[in-house]
Amino acid sequence: MASIFTKIANREIPCHFIAETDEYFAFLDINPVALGHTLVIPKREVDYYFDLENNMYGGIWVFAKKIAKAIERTVPCVRIGVTILGLEVPHAHIHLVPLDDKGIINFKNKVDITDEALAQLAAEIRKKLA
């Protein structure tokens, strides 16, 4: 059975889309820990991040870098934090999280944001993609 992320990348489930290539997909997390919290996934469903083929492993980081730079140009932050947790959804993914001056990613605290505000933010980040 396809993961929720596969369904999102296949446009079977709506998301706040940021960008995609033939191999990778980026979208806003609907339960963000910071404004601009974005998920980057390979379109090919692989459960464990370190099971990605080498070319896909390197390629996703290049794609994530482009997305991170667009987030930085959109959301006020000190820098973009990166984490890979890997247990909540059985589909390899990277969390890109704008950091404030404390530099802490706290996955227990969620940002209260409306669906409309997420849609507007996704559009703003897409405009900043270089």
Image: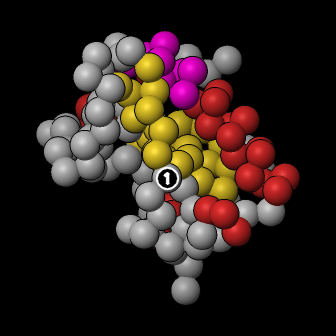
Q: Nearer the viewer, residue 32 or 14?
A: 32
In the image, which residues are magenta? Answer: 68-75
Q: Give the left or right position of residue 51, taking residue 77 as reference.
A: right
Q: Position of residue 50 (x, y in %)?
A: 66, 63
Q: Quick check: 3 above or below 58?
A: below
Locate the C terminus and report the quarter of the image it occupies: top right
Q: Give the left or right position of residue 75, taking residue 93 as reference.
A: left
Looking at numbered disc 1 in the image, what kind of residue is underneath it?
Ile
Q: Quadrant of residue 120?
A: top left
* Tag 1 residue: 84
Residue at image coords 53%, 49%: 94
10 Å crowding of disc 1: few (<14), some (14-19), many (20+): few
Marker count (numbered): 1
Residue at image coords 26%, 22%: 102
Q: Quick check: 18 above or below 90?
A: above
Locate the N terminus and report the quarter of the image it occupies: bottom right
Q: Quick check: 2 above or below 119?
A: below
Q: Give the left or right position of residue 12, taking residue 110 as reference.
A: right
| Secondary structure category for the residue under label 1 | loop
The answer to if 55 sits in the magenta stretch is no
Chief secondary structure of the magenta span? helix
Looking at the image, can residue 6 be seen? no
Q: Position of residue 57 (x, y in %)?
A: 74, 52
Q: Position of residue 14 (x, y in %)?
A: 43, 56
Q: Position of residue 17 (x, y in %)?
A: 50, 42
Please name the colour scheme applied to the rendered image. secondary structure
